[in-house]
Image (tube, rainbow, N blue to C red):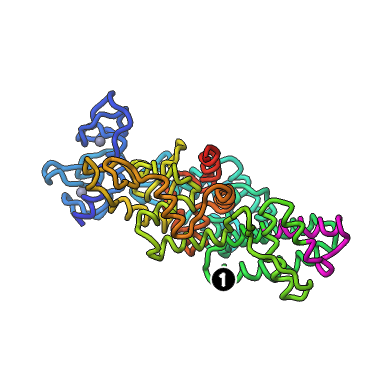
Amino acid sequence: MTADISSRLAVRGRPRTTGAFTCDRCSRAAGKHRASWPEGRICGTCFTVAMRTYGTCPGCGTERMLPGRSASHGDQPVCADCAGITQDYHCSGCGTETEHYRQNTCARCSLRNDLTALLRVDDSQGNETTAAKLLAALCGAQRPESILTWLRKSGVRELLERIATGDILLSHEALDMEPNSLRVEHLRSVLTHHNLLPGRDHYLALFERWLPSKLENIDDVEVRRPIESFARWHHLRRIRTLSTGGRPTRGPVHSAKQEITETIRFLTWLKLTHGRTVASCLQADVDAWLADGPTTRYAIRTFFVWAVKSRTCTNITIGFRQAKTVPLLTQGQRLAMLKACLTDNIDTMSYRVAATLLLLYAQPAVKIAAMKSTDVILTPDGPRLSLGEEHPAPVPEPFASLLTRHLASRPNMRTGSSPGSPWLFPGYRAGQPIHPNTLMMRLREIGIDLLGARNASLRGLVKEVPAPLVAEMLGYSYQVTQKHAAGTAEPWSRYPHTEPRRIMADTP
Ligand SMILES: [Zn+2]
Ligand SMILES: [Zn+2]
Ligand SMILES: [Zn+2]
């Protein structure tokens, strides 16, 4: 018990302000005091810790809150009575001795009072009404304070009220009908967490909502019908199977949407230009379409593989995006190369890391060669990469491990004039980084020929499937990569869509 108490008593954090007064418990300067007790004036930090300290009082042997300190007990935590604290910290509602959230009332009771009024919970109707269930779930939260904070956000009270009155039914589908917003999604996760709603796959659900509206907007039934079959029997079925198996669905949903959108474009063009449908489509039509537009048009490939197999069309073949004169890299090739860099010893660690930076963030060789070890910032949440933007980019697993291992074991560290070379890729020559040409030659040797025209395609691929999605496609779950972003309040979405483009713009 003593160990438990002392660990909870450890004072964390620095006082925010200096000046005003000095806390009589921790002797630090603080803005103002939170309590006046026999031992003196207590700062906010010490007060919060005191309110969370429970145990057997060494003074009277009672098991209760121990906010005070007693000189006669070696400065150990003691109960309010033994410390001569006259304030009563029992909650007027539930009798628990704890910090008061509001006038003589603990946070949980304050929350219960607020919700009972808001949801108009009527005890005479039993605890099976939606309002009663909602009340029980929300009051059961581990930290009632966080629900109280959430209730202050705009629109939240109104949403809860509408659920309690039955205006919004307690179902995923009913919430889907509400304008899509963060507060609806948060409410959904709260309800799911408390078993008021069954759990469901977020990305699968997004796809299920996206698909009908996409199909609805296709006027021509001859275009819509094959797209619908393709979407349902190929993509939806596949994503549902992945979801049931607990596999990540974010990446697959992303590519499914792209493939469906591109196929709608093609079939619409085919009908309008040539008056043909999938069944009468010619190989020449497909070839003309692919030759005459952006590389994203190759996303129709999956549709034709499916259509040929399901005898919806005659034998039309589409190769992977590739051309003789302008070498292009496909997403599949990019993923395969990354996988090789990660799992196979295709080269030394240095070159594998350099190749990863190139394939993952579209950093040109010149830029990679000039990177300093300080461009990799090690944080408790994993490494981050300083790529020239104000916010260092997070590095998802499994690349994070590869990068940190490399940082710890860089080669040529002893050939430099000083033992600690500043370069991320130290060269053979003392104090110099690796030469960009050496780097490019080595990358070409391991099969990554990304000079010139290929840079453009890689740039597109990085935009299409950014680092975290790549991690997921390689079988690393979103949760793992997300963990590294936690605590920084920086969603993946802001990264790295803009960064590679800017850097690549000034590549030769
Ligand atoms: Zn203090
Ligand atoms: Zn006591
Ligand atoms: Zn209470």
> Which secondary structure class fits the magenta region best?
helix
Q: Give the percent coordinates (x, y) of residue 6.
A: 21, 50
Q: Give the percent coordinates (x, y) of residue 244.
A: 56, 71
Instruction: Please state if 105 lies on the left or on the right of 224 as rendered.
Output: left
Q: Is residue 342 magenta?
A: no
Instruction: Please state if 223 lies on the left or on the right of 136 as rendered.
Output: right
Q: Is residue 330 or residue 73 the one in the foreground?
A: 330
Q: Element type at marker 1?
A: helix
Q: Give the percent coordinates (x, y) of residue 210.
A: 69, 57
Residue extending furthest toward the right = 275
Instruction: Please state if 436 lies on the left or on the right of 261 as rendered.
Output: left
Question: At 68% across and 64% down in the image, what residue appears?
Answer: 301
For residue 473, above or below residue 85: below
Chain part drawn in magenta: 259-285
Q: Give the percent coordinates (x, y) of residue 309.
A: 71, 75
Instruction: Please state if 370 lies on the left or on the right of 147 as rendered.
Output: left
For residue 364, above or below residue 338: above
For residue 313, above or below residue 186: below
Q: Dividing the image into 4 quarters, which one contains the N terminus?
A: bottom left
Report whether residue 194 is seen: no
The quadrant where residue 130 appears:
bottom right
